[in-house]
Image (cartoon, rainbow, N blue to C red):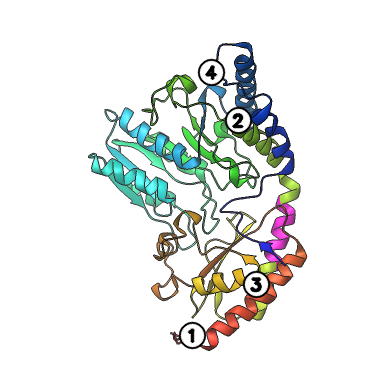
Amino acid sequence: MKVYLDNAATTKVDPRVLKVMLPYFSVNYGNASSIHTMGQENFNVLTDCREKVAKILGADSRGIIFTSSATEANNYLIKGIARANRKKGDHVIISAIEHPCVRESARQLEKEGFRVSIVPVNYEGLVEISELEKLIDKKTVLVSVMMVNNEIGTIQNISELVKLAKKYGTYFHTDAVQAVPYLKIDIKELGVDALSLSAHKFGGPKGVGLAYLNPAVYAEPLIIGGGQEEGKRAGTYNLPGIVGMTSALEIAYKERSEYVKRVKKLRDRLWDGLKKNLPDIQVNGSIKERVPANLNVMFGYVEGEAILIDLSYKGIFVSTGSACSATNLKASSVLAAIGLSKHFLNSNIRFSLGKETTEKEIDYTIKMVTETVGRLREFSPVSKL
């Protein structure tokens, strides 16, 4: 049996999404920037996608900018807003559990002379208002806090954080990549100035994402050399990808309620089975404020990498953390930020369930994880501390 439990890294393209994409590869393949009829027909498709996405997200369509990924969107929004508004302030704040592309963008700004502060999180992985208030000042140009953490699934109270930022006239960005299809994103209600998404996290294709930028806010372009996206992002439109992302977003929102209930039941079944069979394990992050498909578990006294490799041979595909650092065996900065003991920073597995996960797969996973962890602990050189 093969069991894919790494949906936080990427999801399978929904067959319905693939179907609507295919004509734009081989039939309706005109460049949407071309003036001729074939090009303009596709430009109309592009415009329609922009309007649909904006409506779903509760956003102004003028603020929707199609990108190649959320990594590009995060780079553009964080560096672009800070650089373009330096007269407003030279201070940027990010949380201690941001994705590497956010951390590295902030680090680059620091090299350019910006002050960068890291707001800590509590043991559940949540940013507390009081901690942000200690750092923010009138020179803070941007605050960036992710909506849902990619490793531990923690959901931040973005709207409350935004309210504090607005008191100081500070722009607010959120990386919402892991929020769809679990949360209903309404940009106007949240009050964020900038937001990032990636299609392949919710049944869409890889290679396409979006940046939302409040039309009243200017950001310095990251990619230049063309007139696309009103000069905000140059490059030939990836129309098949944009069509696919739009379709995937529509499906995700339409089926959200039913899916959330089902996946939570399966996630809880997995956790109940694991804690029943194995001692010395714990869930990392908040139990309550967490997306229902995520289960990040610390297995005491055994290496997470060893568990992952053994499970892979048994047909179960999981992760030890962010897929973007799969070749980097350093301890997770997210787990360190929530205060996990240094002895257990490399003893963790992230299970991220998806639309196709079944009870049978969950029961098989419980059985195989129990066998794997039990066997590895028998010859583990690490004694109980």
- The percent coordinates of residue 310 (x first, y second) are 58, 74
The answer to whether residue 169 is seen in the rendering is no
- Residue 58 circle label: 2
Q: CA distance from mark 3 to mark 4?
A: 49 Å
- The percent coordinates of residue 189 (x first, y second) are 57, 34
Q: CA distance from mark 2 to mark 3?
A: 43 Å
- The percent coordinates of residue 35 (x first, y second) are 56, 11
Which callout, 2 or 4, points at the residue further toward the start of the chain?
4
Residue situated in front as seen by the camera: 344 or 34: 34
Query: What's the residue at 60%, 38% (across, down)?
Result: 185
Quarter containing the C terminus: bottom left
Where is mark 3, residue-wise? 314
Left or right of 250 in this view: 307: left
Please provide the residue range marked out in magenta: 260-269
Nearest to viewer (mark 1 / mark 2): 1
Amino acid type of disc 4? Ser
Amino acid type of disc 1? Ser
Secondary structure at badge 2 equals loop
Q: Residues within 10 Å of mark 2 (few under 14, many from 20)?
A: some
Secondary structure at badge 1 equals loop
* Image height of 377 relative to 150, above or below: below
The answer to whether residue 35 is seen in the rendering is yes
- The percent coordinates of residue 375 (x first, y second) are 58, 84
Q: Residue furthest front?
A: 26
Secondary structure at badge 4 equals loop
Left or right of 363 in this view: 212: left
Q: Residue furthest left?
A: 113
| Residue 378, quarter of picture | bottom right
Where is mark 4, residue-wise? 33
Amino acid type of disc 2? Gly
Q: CA distance from mark 4 to mark 1?
A: 60 Å
Secondary structure at badge 3 equals loop
